[in-house]
Amino acid sequence: MILTRCAACAKPLSHDAPRCDRCHTRYCDQSCQAAAGHRKTCDEIARGGGAEPFYAGAKASEAADVAVAACAAGVPVDATCARCKWPSTEGFVRGCACGGSEGLAHLSCLVREARESVENYEETRRGRGFQKWHTCFRCGHPFHGPVRLALAWTCWKTYLGRPEDDRYRLQAIGLVGNALFACSDDGREQALLVQESYLASIRRLKPDDEEAMVDALSHLGCCLDDLGRHDEALVLKREVHARRVERCGATHEESIRAATKVWGALHKLRRVASATRFLRAQLPFAKRSLVRDHPLALEIGDRLVDALLSGEASRDDLLEAEAILEHTFETRRRVPRPGGY
């Protein structure tokens, strides 16, 4: 679910919190329900299918209008949809890297393609499946801006009626959270609530789905980082790293990549000593498992040098930094540059 807070006081609620029997709006208790003037809105929300469908429908409609308005400039009078080849008063959107008239489409056509892609995959296990909700497969680029957000809300509206543990329902929650985070500076707090809901759903419903768990932890960590809540982000990034190490081993590239995220959180918190110790432990894994000139191995070396030279560096710190820099310089000097110069 996305509505994870009391409709009256905005207090966080569990997935099984009390709710109105008729419209399914959730409240802390009856006093909050009365304070919110629930009786005035209950009938309208119930006619809309309940709290979640009503809210999803309103957000999808609002996001669609914003997307069409944002893309209206420069659309020819005689434009036709690149998908259905028909003109329309519906309005066009452009949200990928397709050039010219190939980039113009009805939002409803993009939605139809995405729905059909999922249906085809469910029936045949072939095709792009859920990916068409977030990526244009004509140009290969992800949708962006208001179009991305409109597709995400429509995706949630499409699949929220499925069982709680349905894969597409869960993916739709994540899609909304990612779109809010990427497309709207004003929506970062809302993105945080959705990402928290996504992680809570994965922990409760799909605890053994390692990739879904890491995805949810990573996106929530990024959102917390962006909001300046670095301590909380560090906890999640450490969990991602621990999960990668447990599953793949400390020398696997994904584990090393996750380690750089932990260092980033420590660096933002200015925990120089902790960052230095952590990177010292990771550098041998990177050198052992990655090729000499792998960007990730060089990046860890660079970051360890930064950590060593932060604050009052000892003589040993300076010697260690010098050795790493010499290794990095020799490695980069040997790597051919584009164009051969």
Image (cartoon, grey):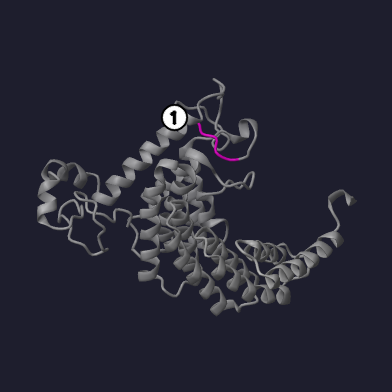
Q: Which sits in the foreground, 193 or 102?
A: 193
164 relative to 175, above or below: below
Judge from the rendering whether residue 300 lies leftward or rightward of residue 73; answer left or right.
Answer: right
**Can you see residue 212?**
no
* Quarter of the N terminus within the rendering: bottom left
Residue at which label 1 appears: 90
- Count numbered badges in the picture: 1
Residue 41 visible, this angle: yes
Q: Is residue 206 left or right of residue 312?
A: left
Residue drawn at (51%, 27%), measured in percent from left and top?
Answer: 87
**What percent of the width, then of the height, locates residue 255?**
60, 72
Quarter occupied by residue 43: top left
Q: Nearer the viewer, residue 112 or 157?
A: 157
Pinpoint residue 42: horizontal percent, then vertical percent. 15, 45
Q: Residues within 10 Å of mark 1 (few under 14, many from 20)?
A: few
Of residues 247 and 119, which is closer to you in this image?
Answer: 247
| Kind of residue at badge 1 | Glu
**Secondary structure, magenta segment, majority class:** loop
Q: Does 64 sit left or right of 53 as displayed?
A: right
Query: Which residue appears at 48% of the width and 61% of the height?
Result: 122
Percent coordinates x, y for residue 146 in the rendering: 47, 38
The residue that appears at 51% across and 30% down in the rendered structure is 71
Q: Secondary structure at mark 1?
A: loop
Taking the view exactly as shown, the residue that stands out farthest to the right is: 340
Which residues lie in the magenta part? Answer: 90-96
Q: Per the image, is 312 magenta?
A: no
Q: Residue 91 colored magenta?
A: yes
* x and y, in percent, of residue 317 in the image: 68, 70
Q: Considering only vertical position in the picture, is 299 above or below 54? A: below
